[in-house]
Image (cartoon, rainbow, N blue to C red):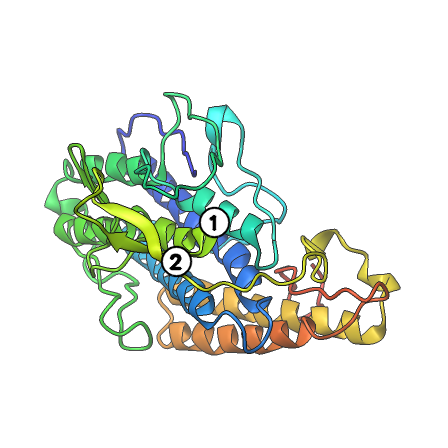
Amino acid sequence: MIRLSVSKLTTIQDAQSLLQTAVGVEFGTLPPYLYALYSIPPNTNSASSQLIRSVALQEMIHMCLACNILNALGGDPIVKVQNYPGPLPGDIGPNGTPLTLHLLPFSKDAMAQAMAIEEPENPPDYPVKTAALLAQATPKAMTIGQFYDALDKFLATLPASVWHQNRNQIVDNQFFTGQLFAVNSYADAHNAITQIVSEGEGTSEGSEYNPLDFQDQPAHYFRFGEIFNERVLTRDPGSSLGYTWGPEKFDVSWPTAGHVISDPSQHNFSQEPQAAQDAQAACNTAFSSMVDALQRAVTGTEGALGEAARFMFDLRMAALHAFTVPLNSGQVAGPAFLYVTASTGDK
């Protein structure tokens, strides 16, 4: 579960800092999700692939919406690359201990990690539940939903004069049609926050929990839960909680463990065949180009989001190839999601 310590917000600068953390959190979830997605063997697990891909795309949208709010408040978003293994921005993790994220191939462990990232404050204990993935949180910690709620409450107190009209806003004329919109007021920011939280965790009203987002699709936590539990989330009036995992099966074919390495940034590729080194270099180049394009997009460059989408396709193709290139051990490795400068190739 992502938990972010948030002190009381009193200034615009406080809100800008919190929003920059939100940008980092939303973007930081992408590599773990994409590593699991791209590692799925060809012609297998099409339903799982579709669910993970849908979450990854929505995380990109969430990042853009967080950037729109930050820009509307006069801030300047920074698309910062995270290290894996490593924590996301902020005080993250149960019991004050940061949640260390890894790049894991498609597996039960990868889905458990994804659920840990997306888990709401009080996840409903549906029948056929998952094992206890995480310890209880300390009262000082916050889930991502509580994090955005604190931000939303502060933004509601701001006068209309603090909102900058049409400042570096990313809209849906390049990509994500119908899902991205400009933030020019508190009402727009509130709508964006509601979308981000709903798609990630679902919503709760009192003791009633709704695991569906505003589009009546399972929120991210529950999409990963379907894969982890190998059961479809099903509305069940006979259950005291209204839903169960199953009884319909969600077909998953777990790949053989150990064939794909985890956390490739920790691996010494200089000792591997040239083909494996070239595959990693291609992944790093595509990822870095995507990051650069996103940075241009969130700071007002027209057309840059479309460029980022094209580089994301390049990254996908490079990653799929990397997962076919054998290492000396016979294993394979996907992208390490390392940023390299365009001019020198330095990390």
* Dot 2 amino acid type: Glu
In the picture, the disc for residue 59 is: 2
- Going from N to C along the chain, the mark reached first, 1 or 2, is 2
| Location of residue 266 with respect to 96 vertically, above or below | below
| Residue 36 falls in image quadrant | bottom right
Q: Residue at 18% of width from left, 56% of height from top? A: 184
Q: Residue at 48% of width from left, 24% of height from top? A: 95
Q: Is residue 342 visible from the viewing direction of this image?
A: no
- Compare residues 71 and 131 and report the one nearer the observer: 131
Relative to 164, 245 lies left or right: right
- Compare residues 313 and 11 and report the one nearer the observer: 313
| Location of residue 42 with respect to 145 vertically, above or below | below
Relative to 276, 179 lies left or right: left
| Location of residue 45 with respect to 8 vertically, above or below | below
The image quadrant where one finds the C terminus is: bottom right
List x then y, in percent, for residue 119: 38, 41
| Residue 151 falls in image quadrant | top left
* Dot 1 amino acid type: Ala
Cα distance between the residues tagged 1 and 2:
12 Å
Q: Mark 1 sits on what residue?
A: 114
Mark 1 or 2: in front is 1
Q: Check disc 2: other Cα within 10 Å, few if <14, some if 14-19, many if 20+.
A: many
Q: Is residue 46 visible from the viewing direction of this image?
A: yes
List x then y, in percent, for residue 201: 31, 46
Q: Residue at 50% of width from left, 63% of height from top? A: 252
The image quadrant where one finds the N terminus is: top left
Q: Residue at 18% of width from left, 45% of height from top? A: 162
Q: Secondary structure at mark 2?
A: helix
List x then y, in percent, for residue 268: 81, 57
| Residue 148 falls in image quadrant | top left
Q: Secondary structure at mark 1?
A: helix
